[in-house]
């Protein structure tokens, strides 16, 4: 991928100027070399939350790889004339990572979602990827840091379960802020090489949530499709116009980071 800069900072959060292929190449190298990486997948809502929360912004900036999941990030970077070449979605990256795991014979652990969701996601993925090794699953409904009860015996048992499973890839789906904080806090205790916070991906893999039709994805209108399906999301979706308004009126909202 030919590009003049590796990353940008959007409202202070570092985001890779990357492609799905480059992202997967980076993750494959990390897996082969057993070099631990945290990967986060911010959308507009997450970047705005990080702008208002220095501690959360620091967590995102400590990750090795932060991909531009939200179409709003692409639009804002273009408005500010520091374009990001590609949108790289967390869901597509997660699916490609599972395909890579099957090809390389690497195992994965699904953590998060309601009771039964991670197991259902594992069952569905093994139907489509029969050679995929699922090292283990666990729901997100346990007392832990993600609900303000860090260090509980139950949480310690979950960490021990993940490590004992031998998983090399860990999906963490607790929801925005919670999953990133959990990974950042416990990564030194976790054995998997790839730690990815990917929100509702497990619900999607389990078939509980349908992705927008491809035409909506290509046009960057997945948010509109979700809003039509779930009108209660209107409050969250109002973040996007506010974000793009900032891109129009706030000089330096997007800055190039060359190193």
Image (cartoon, rainbow, N blue to C red):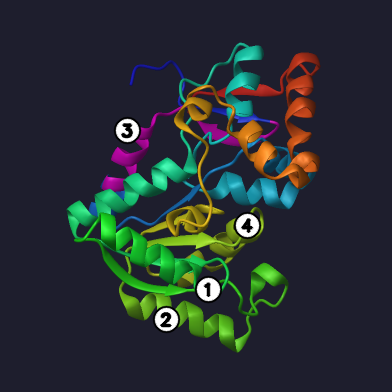
The image shows residue 222 at horizontal and vertical percentages of: 58, 33
Range of residues picked out in magenta: 11-28
Single out the mark in the foreground, 2 or 4. Answer: 4
Give the camera-side residue of 11 and 232: 232
- Report the residue marked by disc 2: 161
For marks 2 and 4, give the CA distance: 21 Å
- Report the residue marked by disc 4: 175
For marks 3 and 4, give the CA distance: 25 Å
For marks 1 and 4, give the CA distance: 13 Å
For marks 1 and 2, give the CA distance: 12 Å
Circle 2 crowding by C-alpha within 10 Å: few under 14, some 14–19, many from 20: some
Q: Secondary structure at mark 3?
A: helix
The image shows residue 125 at horizontal and vertical percentages of: 33, 59
Q: Secondary structure at mark 2?
A: helix
- Report the residue marked by disc 3: 21
**Mark 2 vs mark 4: which is more N-terminal?**
2
């Amino acid at each position: 991928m030919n590009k003049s800069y590796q990353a940008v900072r959007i409202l202070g959060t570092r985001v890779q100027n990357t492609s799905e292929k480059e992202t997967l190449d980076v993750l494959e190298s990390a897996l082969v070399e057993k070099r631990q990486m945290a990967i986060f997948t911010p959308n507009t809502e997450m970047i705005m939350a990080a702008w208002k929360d220095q501690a959360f912004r620091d967590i995102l900036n400590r990750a090795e790889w932060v991909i531009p999941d939200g179409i709003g990030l692409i639009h804002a970077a273009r408005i500010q004339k520091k374009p990001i070449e590609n949108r790289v979605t967390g869901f597509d990256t997660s699916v490609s990572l599972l395909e890579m795991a099957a090809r390389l014979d690497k195992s994965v652990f699904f953590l998060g979602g309601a009771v039964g969701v991670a197991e259902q996601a594992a069952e569905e993925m093994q139907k489509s990827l029969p050679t995929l090794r699922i090292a283990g699953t666990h729901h997100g409904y346990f007392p832990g840091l993600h609900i303000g009860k860090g260090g509980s015996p139950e949480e310690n048992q979950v960490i021990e379960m993940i490590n004992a499973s031998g998983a090399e890839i860990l999906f963490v789906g607790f929801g925005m802020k919670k999953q990133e904080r959990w990974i950042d806090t416990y990564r030194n205790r976790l054995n998997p090489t790839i730690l990815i916070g990917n929100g509702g991906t497990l619900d999607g893999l389990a078939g509980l949530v349908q992705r927008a039709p491809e035409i909506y994805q290509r046009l960057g209108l997945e948010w509109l499709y979700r809003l039509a399906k779930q009108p209660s999301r209107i409050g969250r979706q109002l973040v996007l116009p506010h974000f793009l308004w900032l891109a129009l009126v706030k000089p330096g909202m997007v800055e190039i980071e060359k190193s």
